[in-house]
Image: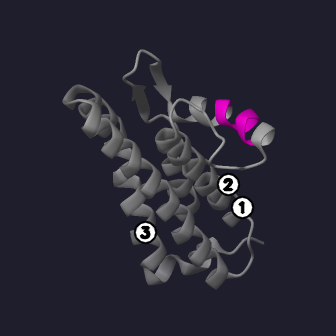
Amino acid sequence: MIKRALIISLILNSIIIVLVPEGHGGGIMILFEILLIPEIIENRIDIGKINFLENNIGVAIMLSLIGKLILISSLFVKKIFKTKIWVKIGLIFLLISFLSICFKAWNDGSFLFAITLGSGIPFLIYWGRVLYLINKEKNKSELVTE
């Protein structure tokens, strides 16, 4: 149940709509993450040199990508204590990324903010569900992989 909720929250984070106001358009989060990977490889993870749309959105998308990689790798950790820590760290990265993108959309206009927040509400619900399931006592053994 925890793993299913974790995978659903990853998918819901991937389909958050990110709109860029300066005529660049928009897309879903996973699209921007895929476009950011070559930029990271080319600039060798130097945040100051990343010129992907704007540094604000680029850093937020990078945080989202890091959070998703942490959560995916936490599915394969065998010890429960380490798994809980990794899941919480990954969820914090995803939440910071989402809030950063919402804050940027708030500064750019109310329509952009409404679209971004509206597409992120299902993610926020499952974000809370994953935290609830991790802290629930009887589901703790479910995080251990065989």
Tell me how far mark 1 sits from mark 3, CA to CA: 17 Å
**What secondary structure characterizes most of the magenta part?**
helix
Q: Is residue 86 above or below residue 121?
A: below
Q: Count neighbours of disc 1 (C-alpha within 10 A) and say few if under 14, some if 14 to 19, many if 20 or more.
A: some
Q: Is residue 63 above or below residue 104?
A: below
Residue with the mark numbered 2: 69
Question: Where in the figure is residue 81, as x and y percent of width and height?
Answer: 62, 84
Q: Residue at x 58, y 77 (%)?
A: 85
Question: Of helix, strand and loop, which one carries label 3?
Answer: helix
Residue 38: in magenta span: yes
Q: Residue at x 63, y 49 (%)?
A: 47
Q: Residue at x 48, y 34 (%)?
A: 15
Q: Count neighbours of disc 3 (C-alpha within 10 A) and say few if under 14, some if 14 to 19, many if 20 or more.
A: some
In the image, which disc is placed on residue 73?
1
Question: Where in the figure is residue 114, as x and y percent of width and height?
Answer: 24, 33
Work out whether residue 16 can be spotted: yes
Contact between labelled residues 2 and 1, with CB atoms less than 8 Å apart: yes
- Left or right of 124 on screen, residue 106: left
Tell me how far mark 1 sits from mark 2, CA to CA: 6 Å
- Mark 1 and mark 3 lie on one chain; the one further toward the N terminus is 1
Residue 98: in magenta span: no
- Left or right of 101 on screen, residue 82: right
Closer to the observer: label 2 or label 3?
2
- Left or right of 32 on screen, residue 42: right
In the image, which disc is placed on residue 140?
none
Question: Where in the figure is residue 90, as x and y percent of width and height?
Answer: 56, 63
In the image, which disc is placed on residue 131?
3
Question: Of helix, strand and loop, which one carries label 2?
Answer: helix
